[in-house]
Image: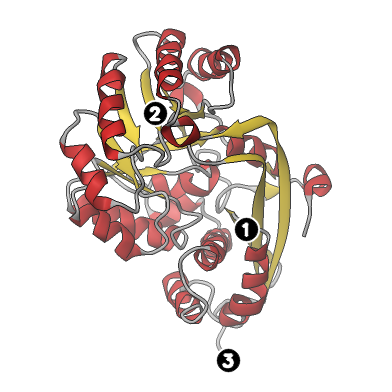
Amino acid sequence: MSDTPVVTGVDTAVYTVPTDAPEADGTLSWDSTTLVLATVRCANVTGLGYTYAPAATARVVHELLADVITGRPVLDVPRLNEALRRAVRNAGAPGVAAQAIAALDIALWDLKARLLGLPLVRLLGAARDDVPVYGSGGFTTYDDDRQERQLRGWVEEDGIPRVKIKIAQSWGREEARDRHRVARARAAVGDTAALYVDANGGYTAKQALRMAEALDDEDVTWFEEPVSSDDLTALAAVRRRTTLDVAAGEYGYTLPYFAHMIAADAVDCLQADVTRCGGITVWLRAAALAQAHGLEISGHCAPHAHAHAAAAVPNLRHLEWFHDHVRIERLLFDGVLAPDGGALAPGADGRPGLGLALAEERARPYRVG
C-alpha cells in the first residue's frame, strides 16, 4: 500500500472588508475588497491560499476543481496545477477560473511545505535573502493631505524607499490634477525616494506621452499601464518614446499572455499576480520567461501570497506593498511580515509554508461565504 500523502479535503471561505476611505484609480472605484480563501487538507495538515476575486470564485472551486485534486498526491503540485487548468477548458481559463486555480495552487504549495516542515522559500530554493517592496496606494479619491500622510508613512515610518500613486483620474480627463498630485507626491517624499505612478490603462497613447514628459520632470521612474495592457501596440509605442520604465502584466491569467507581452517589446519590467496567473507554479514560470528575455519581474499586490516565491527568483525587481491588501492580510492572518527597511524576509522565522494562519476571531465578522 502506498504511503504517498494525498489531498483529503478542499474548502473555501469568502471575506469582504470595507476600505478605510473611498478609493479609486484611473478607471474604477470601490469601497470594499473581497478575499476568497482556499484550504487544502492532507489528513490533519492544512495549507491555505487565497485570491482577491468575486465570491463566485469559491463556487468555481467547489463545482469544477475540488474533485480534480482530491485523492491525488499532494507533493506533485505542477501536475495538479495542470489538471486544474484542463478542468476549466470549457468554462474558460482566464478570469475567475484562473483565480480559483491560483488560490488552490498557493494552498497546495503551502501544504507541501508544511508537510515537509519547511518555509516555502526553502522548499522552492532561495535566490535572495530579502524581497524589496514599494508602498502602493495614493488613490485618486485622496486629497492632498491624505496622500501626503500615506506617502510619508511609508518612507519615514516604514523605511520604504519606493512609493506609487494612482493617476489618469476619470479615464484621463483630469490631466491637470494628475500633474498636481504627482508634484505633491514628489514634495512629500523628497529627492531620495523613488516615485512611481500607475495609470491603470486610463490614458490614450498621446496622453500618456504628454504625461510622460511631466512625470520625467518630477523624476518619476516607473509608469505602470500608461495605456491599456490589452493594446500591446500602443503600450510598446509609449515604451519606445519615453525614458520611464513602462510596466504591465497584472491582468495575465495564462503564461502565453506574458509571452505575447514580451514578444511585443511592450514592457521594461514584467508584472505578474500570483493570485491571478494560476498560482505560484505559473508565477515562477513567468519569472523565468522574463529572465530569458533580459527582463525583471515585479509581483502585483497580495504581498504575503507572493513573498516566498519572489525570494526564489533572481530577476525580481520588487513586490507591491498595496495599501488595501496589506490591511486585509494583517486583519485576516497571523504571521504577517513587516517591510523593515523597505524589504520583507520570508521564512526568516522558520515557520513552515507561507507562515500564515487564519485569525478566525478577527476574520469572523467579515465572512460572507
Say which amino acid is labelled 2. Answer: Val
The location of residue 240, given as percent across then percent down, is 16, 38
Q: Which of marks 3 and 2 is nearer the N terminus?
A: 3
The quarter of the picture where the C terminus appears is bottom right
Q: Earlier in the sequence, mark 2 or mark 1?
A: 1
Q: In this view, does 292 lie above or below 151?
A: below
Viewer-proximal residue among 301 and 257 = 257
Question: Residue at label 2?
Answer: 197
Label 1 Cα crowd, 10 Å radius (few <14 / some 14-19 / many 20+): many
Query: What count of labels does the image hold?
Result: 3
Q: Distance between the residues labelled 2 and 1?
A: 32 Å
Viewer-proximal residue among 161 and 73 = 161
Say which amino acid is labelled 3. Answer: Met
The location of residue 287, given as percent across then percent down, is 31, 52
Viewer-proximal residue among 206 and 361 = 206
Q: Does residue 65 show up?
A: yes
Q: Does residue 335 show up?
A: no
Q: Which mark is residue 56?
A: none
Label 2 Cα crowd, 10 Å radius (few <14 / some 14-19 / many 20+): many
Say which amino acid is labelled 1. Answer: Leu
Q: Is mark 1 on a helix, strand or loop?
A: strand
Residue located 19% across and 28% down the image:
243
Q: Of the residues tagged 1 and 3, which is closer to the observer?
A: 1
Q: How far apart are marks 3 and 2 (CA)?
A: 57 Å
Q: Is residue 245 above or below residue 155?
A: below
* 209 left or right of 174 in image: left
Question: Residue at label 1?
Answer: 48
Residue located 46% across and 63% down the image:
278
